[in-house]
């Protein structure tokens, strides 16, 4: 594991890296090309409105951003607390297998517990992405008993 990687809240100056990572992730996982102008506006919107969520970045000692994820919020009336949804996970290919995602996830877990108003952490993963599923299970996440449905508008 790369002990030199640090995790921090992303800043607007990280937007270009996050846009690039989102485009790479869409290409790698779904063979989709995300238009730069749309994804840039989407990423920038998160920095402009904290109700949309927040980003974390993983960086090297020389301040190279090598990974990121986004947290979005879901209110649970059943629990009167928040679920934090992990989205837009990406680790640069040169840094995979070095514990970068583990450090990102540990930051999320620690911060969620500190706040006291978070009841759980959730994410969704492509059914065929077995490698990611193994990583999530290894970190203690379990497959939920829900199926996901959507209507794209």
Image (cartoon, rainbow, N blue to C red):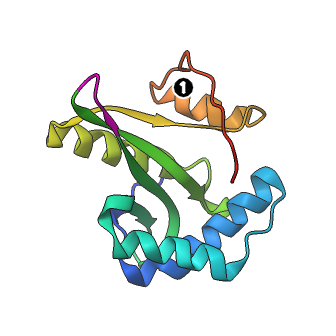
Tell me if I can see residue 144 in this picture. yes
The secondary structure making up most of the magenta span is: loop
Q: Is residue 111 left or right of residue 34?
A: left
Q: 144 left or right of 3?
A: right
Q: Please state the horizontal and vertical placement of residue 133, each as a whole percent of the image.
A: 63, 31
> What crowding class fits label 1: few (fewer than 14 Cα within 10 Å), some (14-19), or many (20 or more)?
few
Magenta range is 75-79
Q: Is residue 132 above or below residue 5?
A: above
Figure disc tally? 1
Image quadrant holding the C terminus, namely bottom right
Between 53 and 19, the one nearer to me in the picture:
53
Quick one: which residue is furthest to the front in this view? 153
According to the picture, the residue beneath numbered tag 1 turns out to be 137
Q: Determine which quarter of the picture holds residue 91.
A: bottom right
Q: Is residue 87 left or right of residue 5?
A: right
User: Helix, strand or loop at disc 1?
Assistant: helix
Compared to residue 125, the image places residue 80 above or below, namely above
Q: x%, y% of residue 73? A: 36, 47
Q: Nearer the viewer, residue 6 or 69?
A: 69
Q: Kindly identify the residue that appears in the image at 52 percent across and 27 percent down.
A: 138
Q: Where in the figure is residue 68, as x and y percent of width and height?
A: 49, 61
Quadrant of res 63: bottom left
Q: Judge whether residue 1 can be spotted in this image.
A: no
Q: Is residue 37 or residue 56 the one in the foreground? A: 37
């Amino acid at each position: 594991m790369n002990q030199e990687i640090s995790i921090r809240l992303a800043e607007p100056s990280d937007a270009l890296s996050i846009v690039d990572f989102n485009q790479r992730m869409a290409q790698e996982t779904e063979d989709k090309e995300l238009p730069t102008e749309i994804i840039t506006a989407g990423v920038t919107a998160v920095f402009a409105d904290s109700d949309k969520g927040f980003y974390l970045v993983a960086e090297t000692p020389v301040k190279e951003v090598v990974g990121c994820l986004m947290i979005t919020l879901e209110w649970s009336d059943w629990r009167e607390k928040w679920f934090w949804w992990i989205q837009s996970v990406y680790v640069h290919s040169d840094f995979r297998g070095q514990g970068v995602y583990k450090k990102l996830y540990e930051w999320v877990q620690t911060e969620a517990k500190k706040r006291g108003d978070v009841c759980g952490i959730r994410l969704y993963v492509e059914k065929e992405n077995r490698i990611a599923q193994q990583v999530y299970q290894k970190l203690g996440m379990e497959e939920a008993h829900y199926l996901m449905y959507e209507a794209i508008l």
